[in-house]
Amino acid sequence: MKVIIPAAGAGTRLFPHTHTKPKPMVFIAGKPIIGHILDRMIDLAPEEVILIVGYRKEQLISYVDKYYKDTFNIRYVCQENRMGLGHSVYLAKEHIHDSEIMIALGDMIFKTGYKDFHGQYCQNGECSASIGVREVDEPRKYGIVYLDGQSSYIEKLEEKPENPSSNLGIAGVYFIKDTSLLLNILGWMMENNIKTRGEYQLTDALQEMVSRGSKLKTFQVSSWYDCGHAKSLLEANRILLSEQESTSETYESISSVIMPPVKFGANVKVINSVIGPFTSIAEDSVIENSIISNTVIGSRTHLSSVNLQSSIVGDDANVVGKHNSLNIGDSSSIEF
């Protein structure tokens, strides 16, 4: 089995943090998003990992080569014109051939490993594909699956429907057995310019497989961590830290209090500060005279005299607060 990870997008919902880096390289819980994804694939032992890269691809390639080239057989395919998830999968056509594939999105981290999902896919028996699903609160924001009430097969798939009657959201992991048919359909869609919201959607290609008589099934995904925007990124950081041991790279702490769970990169210096809980600080950063909690801080950043909660601070930032002097009378209420 080969794995395709579409990771070419600009990550506009995470601006300004993705102005200078691709979304999979955003740091949470001790490493970039792509590191968490690849860690969860190690037990799967895929034949090859095909990363679809594009926006600021050099950073992603450099990181993956440095930390994972001895673990996986990795291939990079460039998506110069980003025209949707279906388009990104199609670009890997010449490297897939007839192999079964798993598609895993480059901004979704799952609590369980992909080997568990593969086991559920195998238990589905004879089918052309299996799609991970989970019940969602706002189905209009997701690709949605409708099941045949008389069987366990998928009856219909729809990308971000206006009036959905199902709340089974596509979770961002797919196993494709009939790879040739999927690739042929994607090619047909491009030849005929079949787009939804201006893009070639993988959901539409899977629906076409159903329309042509293919049997598709689902499997349940219990927990996913969507790292696509700031609020969900902080929540993912919080959950991932709570699941990990609070081990960190070499760091220096002077007259400071560290409240786990936290994760520090190499050469972090903390001076006269309170750090944590649920805080990630990347390498070579300096924190002094500050109180930081539930926050993600990038590399080579300097924070001084600040009180931060539920914040995201990028790489190479310099944030300096100021001390205040107060003379407050009785029964006063002040908010800063």
Image: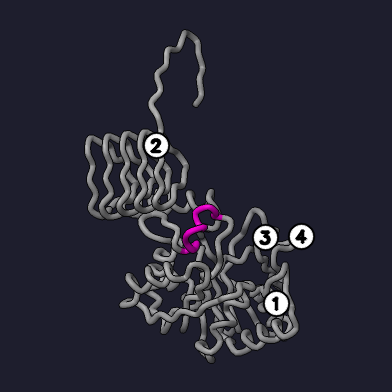
Dots 4, 2 in contact, CB < 8 A: no
Q: Which amino acid does label 1 sit on?
A: Gln
Q: Which amino acid does label 4 sit on?
A: Glu
Dots 4, 3 in contact, CB < 8 A: no
Residue 65 appears at what percent x and percent y? 36, 74
Residue 130 appears at what percent x and percent y? 58, 76
Q: Is residue 26 above or below residue 194?
A: above
- Could you tell me which residue is drawn at 47 percent across and 76 percent down? 51
Which disc, if any, is residue 207? Answer: 1
Q: Earlier in the sequence, mark 1 or mark 4?
A: 4
Q: Judging from the image, what secondary structure is the residue with disc 2 in?
A: strand
- Name the residue beneath numbered marker 4: 162
Dots 1, 4 in contact, CB < 8 A: no
Mark 4 vs mark 3: give the one in front: 4
Compute the Cα span from label 1 to label 2: 53 Å
Mark 4 vs mark 2: give the one in front: 2
Q: Which amino acid does label 2 sit on?
A: Val
